[in-house]
Amino acid sequence: IETISSTEKDLTSKEQTLNFTKTTLVKTIDGMDVMLTKMNNEKAELVKLGDKLTDAQKAKLETLNHSITKTEGLKKETTSKLNEVTTGLNQITVGKIELAKKKTSLQAQEKELEKAKSTLTIELTKASSKLEQGEEELNKGIKEFELARDQALKNASIDGVITSDMISN
């Protein structure tokens, strides 16, 4: 369970980092969208002028086209990174769910183990008590047997049974 708790902490730390990164990427993409909108509006205004463009405006249009292309490329890369971060967050969520399941399972197993220990302790106590009772019964039986044997030997003694008359005949 300690390993699971440590892994949970690691995942939470990584999750926080990825969430921060995701927020930053979303803000960056939003900023790029604003810039692209402005550049495309400015481009549209210049394109409307058609043949009336001055050399400076033509240069600006060329610079805008280059900037739009570059910004769209950066936005595509940033969106790709955002998708990777989102995938990572999803994997962390799945990992946390799996860890939670394992932790719950281990806790249930620990409870079962505690129950088994308790049951074993109770059964060992009962068995010990029965052994003590059995030992007492055995000792009592041995004493009764020894008394009965002594009595039987005493009763079986031939001292008073054979008389001198019996021997002479």
Image (tube, rainbow, N blue to C red):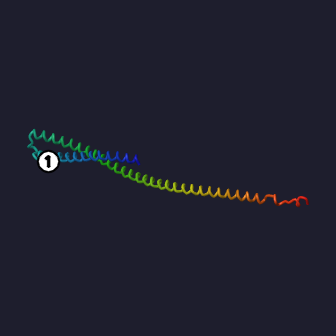
Where's residue 122, x and y in %?
52, 56
Q: Nearer the viewer, residue 36 or 127?
A: 127
**92 left or right of 50?**
right
Quick one: label 1, few (<14), some, or many (20+) residues within 10 Å? few
Where's residue 165, x and y in %?
89, 61
Q: Nearer the viewer, residue 13 or 20?
A: 13
Q: Which residue is mark 1?
A: 41
Q: Nearer the viewer, residue 54 or 1?
A: 1
Report the quarter where the C terminus lies: bottom right
Q: Residue at x 13, y 40 (%)?
A: 60
Q: Residue at x 63, y 58 (%)?
A: 137
Where's residue 23, x and y in %?
25, 47
Numbered label tally = 1
Q: Residue at x 13, y 45 (%)?
A: 42
Q: Amino acid at mark 1?
A: Asn
**48 left or right of 153?**
left
